[in-house]
Amino acid sequence: MYRYRNIVLTIPPQVFHPGFFFSTKLLLKYLNKFGLTDKHFLELGAGSGLISIYASQQGAKVVASDINTIAVQALQNNAAVNNVQMHILHSDLFAAIPQQAFDIISINPPYYKRKPVTDADYAWYCGEGGEYFQALFKDLGNYIHSSSEVLMILCDGCDLEMIQSIAWRNSFQLNCVYSRNNLLEKNFIYKIAPINA
């Protein structure tokens, strides 16, 4: 069990735990600056559902996805316990998400370069060649409009140069809008935008 303000979560051991790491809460705090009422909101890799549940509480129309079937079940249970409505999908990135334009997309990605093997690995590993990011940036343009806010949190322990290069090859740029040091690492929140937008 984990509690964040008025949100109560049950988190299986195979699912990324937002209480043990800074990234989810940092991204959530940054999202506080946005008015979420009636926004079409997507969380890719929603894990336990903390961000998605918060967005739903604020009146957003939420789609929450995860590749991990255990995370999807946890999402369903946590949404019910917190009495929020959201559309929950088992999806490898955009694969099972019907094409549509979202107002806000929130991404706390896996970013260590190793091939994921278990369900739990998908929260951490993006593939040896950054395959996660290749797939993300290949399809992202089909899910945004001219005013979409696409926010992704990374840290100084990942291959930022590789991720920025993959984004650039797919006509996207990463603009750092917030950074914060903690005891273990430095986190960066990037706004992803089409080049020349």
Image (spheres, rainbow, N blue to C red):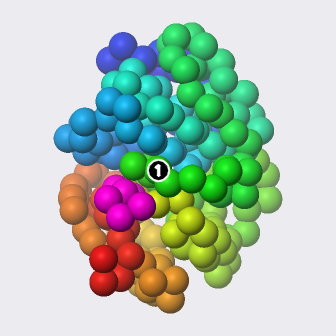
Give the residue type that dot 1 points to. Phe
Near-viewer residue (51 or 137): 137
State left or right for residue 27 relative to residue 65: left
State left or right for residue 136 relative to residue 40: right
Relative height, residue 33 to residue 60 (above, below): below
Q: Residues within 10 Å of mark 1 (few under 14, many from 20)?
A: many
Residue at the spot of label 1: 102
State left or right for residue 66 relative to residue 146: right
Residue 12 seen in this snapshot: no
Quarter in which the N terminus is drawn: top right
* Residues shaded magenta: 145-150
Residue 52 seen in this snapshot: yes
Q: Secondary structure at mark 1?
A: strand
Q: Residue at x 58, y 48 (%)?
A: 45
Quarter in which the C terminus is drawn: bottom left
Q: Is residue 148 magenta?
A: yes
Relative height, residue 89 to residue 6 (above, below): below
Q: Quadrant of residue 179?
A: bottom left
Q: Residue at x 58, y 38 (%)?
A: 64
State left or right for residue 127 relative to residue 186: right
- Report the predominant secondary structure element of the magenta stretch: strand
Q: Is residue 178 magenta?
A: no
What percent of the width, then of the height, locates residue 68?
Answer: 72, 44
Q: Quadrant of residue 110?
A: bottom right
What percent of the width, then of the height, locates residue 147?
Answer: 32, 59
Q: Residue at x 35, y 82 (%)?
A: 195
